[in-house]
Amino acid sequence: MKIIVTGGAGFLGSRLIAALLDGDRGVERIVSLDRIACPVEDPRVESRIGSIDDPGCVAGALDGDVGIVYHLAAVLSGQSEAEFDTGLHINVDATRLLLEACRKLPRPPRFVFTSSLAVFGGEMPDVVPETLAPMPQSSYGVGKAIGELLVCEYSRKRFVDGIVCRLPTIAVRPGRPNSAASSFVSGIIREPLNGEPSEMPVPPDTRMWISSPETVIANLVLAGGIDGAALGLNRVLDLPGITVTPAGMLDSLSRLAGQAARDLVTLTSDPKIIDIVCSWPGAFDVARPLGLGFTADSDFDAILRQYMASLA
């Protein structure tokens, strides 16, 4: 089986590729489509260096017997808000381009689209049900909401066998901050553990829906193989997460890494980040995805221990 991963050189994409290669999954070839080469070294991995808005590049990657397409590549929330045209072009136009390339394949591939809880906004219940209509309050959320509709429509027409996975905010991400408005969620843990200062730009009691990278990857692997008939008409899943606040995260940091690490985090206020992040919901009804076999982390202490173990 051939698998395509857009954004395959990135944080999630490279980890997804490594997970797909692990075990007996019948993977013959994985094509990473990204602007740089995929860091996973394996003879079954091919790096196609280019952009997902390039028709020739997309057509070249999606040749032959493609079984699964994981569409992870996107312009993140902060950049989407600052660069309106760029965000819509990559997050909407390029998604349509990719779907059209899938439409031309000999058989409809499984199409896993990573969306975001940023599709929600406005007044929301404490726990968001599956039936709540999207009302994004950011350009990034708008682009993802349009992408969801496109995937669902191409699935209805049987051009693809689509599944939309709305990802929780992922923490803790290694490396350096990125352009996501939620980048601070990892930063207030990662930087102090590196002995570096960090800022928390939202109110300490802001409810956030998060998941560890390992759990998200496991859920994306599952999404690639789950029976489409089990999804029914609703191809959109809010992936399981846990509800945390920045204050609770910092309590965990103090408890597991010491007060000195906690003291490196300064409480600030950034209206631009607040406007985006505080428009997102903090809890979801995930009974359906849990029933389908998707999983969640137990608590933030477990996530932090997992990340600290990776640094050892």
Image (spheres, helix red, strand yellow):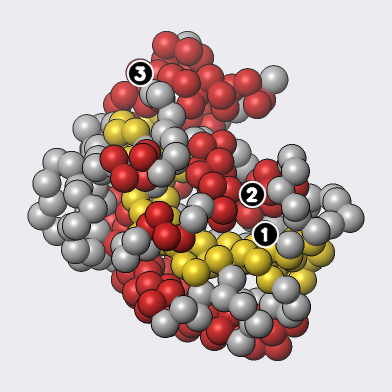
Whether residue 195 is visible here, answered yes or no, is: no
Q: Amino acid at mark 1?
A: Gly
In the image, taking residue 96 as reference, residue 11 lies left or right, namely right
Would residue 285 appear left or right of 81 to someone viewing this image?
A: left
Taking 170 as reference, is 13 left or right?
right
Q: Earlier in the sequence, mark 3 or mark 2?
A: 2
Q: CA distance from mark 3 to mark 1?
A: 34 Å
From the viewer's side, name the closer residue of 85 and 305: 305
The answer for how far apart the CA atoms under marks 2 and 1 are is 8 Å
Give residue 251's mark. Answer: 3
Residue, x 62% and y 78% (percent of image)?
A: 107
Q: Local crowd at mark 3 within 10 Å, few (<14), some, or many (≥20)?
A: some
Residue wearing tag 2: 16
Instruction: For mark 2, give the secondary structure.
Output: helix
Mark 1: few/some/many CA within 10 Å (<14, 14-19, 20+): many
Depicted 193 relative to depicted 175: above or below: above
Most distant residue in the right direction: 43
Q: Nearer the viewer, mark 2 or mark 1?
A: 2
Determine which of the numbered discs, if any, sits on residue 8 in the image: 1
**Left or right placement of residue 5 versus residue 196 in this view:** right
Q: Say which amino acid is labelled 3.
A: Asp
Q: Residue furthest front?
A: 229
Which residue is pictured at 38% across the width and 72% down the height?
152
